[in-house]
Image (cartoon, grey):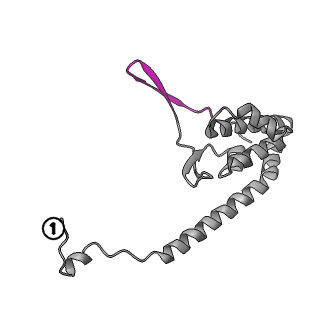
């Protein structure tokens, strides 16, 4: 496994404040559990939790860290969902990196194997969402073309 390149950060100064903007050119686009688009760095941990709900990430972290979910929730409950997810991902990443140092690639294969249940659940949710969207599209009548109202002889309020 090749060593990762260090992320280039571009500091910007705005009215006495320094704003750090990470180089996101190598990030991968993904779908969050909410359906929103997001980005991640593409490492095995990020791919493992991509699209997973916070509860699924807690379950994965509990398994990887060999810690009860309740203990993890008690530790991170005061944080918002994104920060909880970030902290859990970083803790998982630490275990994976330690395993990779012991035997090259063993951490990557471990997280891929352990997260297979989550990946399957995410794929099932995505398929169900796609089916629901297709069914909704069939139910919704097609909109009239833009100039159809004007051709019918009726004038809209804007045209008057």
- Secondary element at image label 1: loop
Q: Is residue 158 above or below residue 57?
A: below
Q: Residue furthest top?
A: 16
Q: Main secondary structure of the magenta part?
A: strand
Q: Which residue is mark 1?
A: 159
The reply to whether residue 137 is visible in this rendering is yes
Q: Residue furthest front?
A: 157
Foreground pick, 62 / 1: 62
Counting from the top left corner in percent of width and height, residue 23 is at 52, 36
The reply to whether residue 95 is visible in this rendering is no
Tag count: 1
* Among the 4 quarters of the image, the one containing residue 107: top right
Foreground pick, 25 / 141: 141
Q: Is residue 54 left or right of residue 71?
A: left
* Among the 4 quarters of the image, the one containing residue 118: bottom right
Quarter of the image with the N terminus in it: top right
Q: Is residue 2 above or below residue 112?
A: above
Question: Which residue is depicted at the point 54% across and 68% down?
Answer: 133
Question: Which residue is depicted at the point 17% across and 74% down?
Answer: 155
Q: Is residue 46 magenta?
A: no
Question: Which residue is depicted at the point 77% across and 36% down?
Answer: 72
Foreground pick, 37 / 44: 37
Q: Is residue 19 magenta?
A: yes
Q: Residue furthest left?
A: 160
Quarter of the image with the C terminus in it: bottom left
Counting from the top left corner in percent of width and height, residue 142 is at 40, 76
* Among the 4 quarters of the image, the one containing residue 103: top right
Q: Is residue 79 left or right of residue 63?
A: left
Counting from the top left corner in percent of width and height, residue 126 is at 63, 62
Q: Circle 1: is it few (<14), some (14-19), or many (20+) Cα within 10 Å?
A: few
Q: Please provide the residue range marked out in magenta.
A: 5-21
């Amino acid at each position: 496994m090749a060593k990762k390149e260090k992320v280039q950060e571009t500091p910007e100064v705005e009215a006495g404040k320094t704003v750090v903007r990470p180089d996101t050119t190598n990030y991968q686009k993904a779908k969050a559990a909410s359906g929103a688009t997001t980005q991640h760095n593409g490492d095995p941990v990020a791919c493992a939790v991509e699209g997973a709900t916070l509860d699924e990430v807690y379950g994965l972290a509990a398994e990887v860290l060999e810690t009860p979910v309740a203990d993890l929730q008690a530790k991170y409950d005061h944080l918002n969902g994104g920060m909880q997810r970030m902290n859990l991902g970083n803790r998982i990443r630490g275990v994976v990196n330690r395993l990779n140092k012991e035997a090259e690639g063993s951490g990557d294969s471990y997280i891929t194997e352990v997260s297979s249940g989550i990946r399957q659940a995410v794929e099932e949710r995505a398929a169900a969402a796609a089916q629901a969207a297709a069914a909704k599209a069939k139910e919704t009548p097609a909109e009239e073309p833009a100039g159809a109202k004007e051709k019918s002889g009726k004038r809209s309020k804007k045209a008057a």
